[in-house]
Structures are given as C-alpha cells and as structure tokens.
Amino acid sequence: MQTNPFTELEFSRLGAGQVAYLRKVKTDDLATSFPALPPMAPGVELWALFAANGDPIVLSDERENVLVGAQEHELRTVMLQ
C-alpha cells in the first residue's frame, strides 16, 4: 500500500503561483466558482482559468482571453476536460 507523501494542504498548494488550469464551464455552474458574478443566461459555455488550488482567476467567452490572463499572471497553463 502506497501512502501519499503530501498532506491535503500541501497538495492543494502544489503549483501555487506557477500553474493554472483552463477548462470550459457552463454559466449554470459559475455561482460556486465566481460568486460575485451577476446572473447569466443558463447553458452558455465560457472559458475559465483556475489557480492550481481551484481558486478562479479569469472568466471569458474567448479562450485566447483566458490564455492572455494566464500570461499576465505568469502562469503555466494546463487544460482540463
């Protein structure tokens, strides 16, 4: 049996400030990640950039805008499906 060498807190900080992930999100699911957003039409797909620990950074209808946001924050991006 293999044990995890990281605590949950250490694992959540892995890549902090260096790595972010990019994925499509639907407006229906944004309230939890982006609580300050005004109400949006349901079912619309947008692009979101999240910090390694899951904190939201950038939201846009254009993938390129999210990538520019990552560059501005000097983050390496990965894409999640």
Image: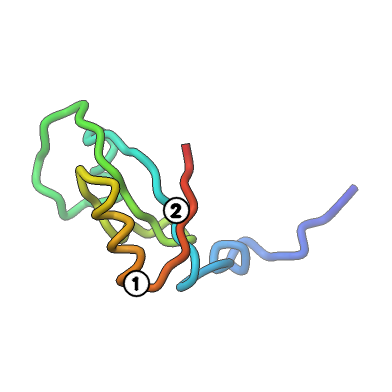
Q: Could you tell me residue 50's position as x and y percent?
A: 38, 56
Q: Which type of secondary structure does the marked residue at label 2 adopt?
A: strand
- Can you tell which quarter of the image residue 74 is in? bottom left
Disc number placed over residue 73 in the picture, else none: 1
Tell me the distance, in whole angstroms, between the alpha carbons under discs 1 and 2: 13 Å
Amino acid type of the residue tagged 1 in the rendering: His
Task: Name the residue nearer the viewer: 64 or 38.
Answer: 64
Residue drawn at x 33%, y 57% is 67
Task: Name the residue nearer the viewer: 15 or 64.
Answer: 64
Instruction: Verify CB contact (< 8 Å) between mark 1 and mark 2.
Output: no
Amino acid type of the residue tagged 2 in the rendering: Tyr
Residue drawn at x 24%, y 51% is 59
The residue identified by callout 2 is: 21
Q: Is residue 4 left or right of residue 80?
A: right
Q: Could you tell me residue 68's position as x and y percent?
A: 29, 61
Q: Earlier in the sequence, mark 1 or mark 2?
A: 2
| Mark 2 surroundings within 10 Å by alpha-carbon count, few (fewer than 14), some (14 through 19), many (20 or more) | many
Q: Which type of secondary structure does the marked residue at label 1 adopt?
A: loop
